[in-house]
Amino acid sequence: MKDTESPLGPRPKLLPIAPKAAPGRRHLPLAQGARPVDQYWRPLYAVWELTLQCDLACRHCGSRAGRSRPDELDTRESLDLVDQMHAMGVKEVTLIGGEAYLRKDWLVIAKAIADKGMELTMTTGGRNLDDEKARAMKAVGFRSVSVSIDGLEPMHDALRGVKGSWKAAFRALKSLKAAGIPVSVNTQITRPGLTQIEDTFDLLVQAGVHAWQVSQTVPMGRAADEPDLLLEPFQVLETMAVLYRIKKKADAARVRIWPGNDIGYFGPYETMLRGNMPRGHMSSCGAGRMTLGIEANGAIKGCPSLPTREYTGGNLRDETLKDIWERSEPLRFTRERTVEDLWGFCRTCYYAEDCLAGCSWTSHVFLGRIGNNPFCHHRTLELLREGKRERMVLKTAAPGEPFDYGIFEIVVEDWPADELARARELVATPEGFLLHTERAQAGIRARFEARAQDLPDSVDYD
Amino acid sequence: MARHTHIPCTQCARHVRATDPQCPFCGTAITEAQRLSVASAPSLSHRLSRSAMLAVGASLTLGACASTTSGDRDGQVTADARPDAMDEGTIGALYGDPGPAPEYGAPPPPPMDAGDSDGGPAPRYGAPPAPVAV
Ligand code: SF4
């Protein structure tokens, strides 16, 4: 991207913004029986896409949300799923979308989850989450709600595709707090948004959040259409420096930092960021071991983020949740992985046996398969030692379905001389950004502000 | 799946295998005291909710901080988590602990008694654990 180009110009014209999703795949094969390891792991945390319908038009939306799926579970089927999750030992359910509150029976389903004693949370864009909804949410038992906020107002609105989204998100935080629901925020780091994250975090502290979940935008769904939104692997150096700085503020403000599994790994800030987790550092991908992903049509995955095509283990209309969990290959893939399954840099890494290439989602949507992850702090530091860095180059565009992805290749190259010195300084201090990022910022901000003027006030997909 | 116990290096903060004599990144020696404190860390059950797991993890970390260590506790799991067929005590060591933060999820709620409006708990500073139902 040239410094003078807009990082968020007009949307790519090739693909529809919100395609009508194809019906879920049915009657997928299951293994004859469950192995001990399949019965050992139990879904502790379920993330449930209640509907694909959405009132935003986010340019980085991994599920290309907007319209409902043609075959979403009805109320009876949804309540049956709640019973099955409870029987399986699920302890926490996060409702997502699309936008979960656009489903007419969402509070009925939410109440059933809470009534079973499972912790009930939600992630929302908050566009239409007003006082009345917040009070209703409190009444049915929401324990915490996370609102998605990706930057300062013009940037957030431009990313979310609807004017007023940023103000609405902060209004939602206020409504939720007024109703007595603890609030947190989810933030995706994009390339143009990286330098705004600290200023954004300051606003979140003022808004009284108890936790902040941070992840990076990866090329799934609509984000796959816009490579300019994506960080380069070498920018992990910047991301981690930003998180280091934010963690200091967060500790002072008593806000818990909750890095997504795609953030890391094993650099000098690992203990600071993940020292409160059971192993004191990141562990490998939890898909299908603790985490369960549910699509609105009953498709079951080991993690909500994973691509639908390759990682759907079965459909609730065909099999029980227990059978899909225990006997479908796509949910088993993390249960017996070894270093033999890794490739590229990760294969010979010092941390390979414990990390197993980190986030499967990140690897798969960039490279078309898991087992090698260039978005890694340790790896970036090791390459920096040799004066090298990695970049991603798009080779094949995404086809335009929910949860689809393009294919990228890793290019290993020398750091430009001036950036190499800056990168080493950034690691040592850790203050500031890389030179390219610093130079690009003024232009980026100006263009976001201009872009935010042209946005629609609402979206109507039908 | 072989799993290593890691100890943060006291000099450069990188994680080092507890079996290594020194940090491969900066050469600082790993002391016997560091190794011992990791080996004696208590167990965690993967059947805890995320907020409970974090709350317990936080108290462990706080304890570990005193000796500047942190460690791998997944070699032991609670009996209720294990099907009868499993080999006592080995499955956790074989399969490790779950990764608790899918990107499409949300941060876990604060512990029940943390209140709604004080910004929530900061586990590194020893917030009380959430009510736990295992
Ligand atoms: S290089 Fe790969 S295996 Fe090693 S820590 Fe990074 S992501 Fe994990």
Image (cartoon, coloured by chain):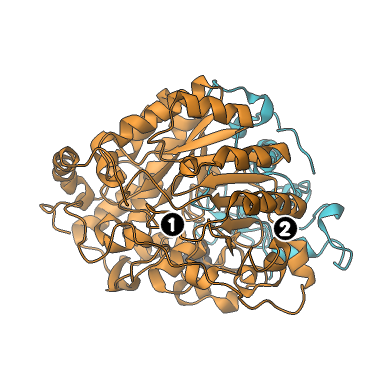
Chain colours: A orange, B cyan
Badge 1 amino acid: His
Q: Chain of mark 1?
A: A
Name the residue tied to disc 2: A42
Q: Secondary structure at mark 2?
A: loop
In front of the other: A387 or A372: A372
The residue depicted at 17 percent of the width and 54 percent of the height is A10
Q: Is the CB atom of the residue marked by disc 1 within 8 angstroms of ligand 1's nearest atom?
A: yes
Name the residue tied to disc 1: A377
Quadrant occupied by the N terminus of chain A = bottom left
> How far across and how far down the image is residue B27, in percent?
53, 58
Name the quadrant containing residue A18: bottom left
**Residue A153 vertical position relative to residue A238 in the rendered view, above or below:** above
In front of the other: A92 or A335: A92
User: In this orientation, does residue A413 appear?
Assistant: yes
| Disc 2 versus disc 1: nearer the observer | 2
The residue depicted at 41 percent of the width and 40 percent of the height is A125
The residue depicted at 75 percent of the width and 51 percent of the height is A89
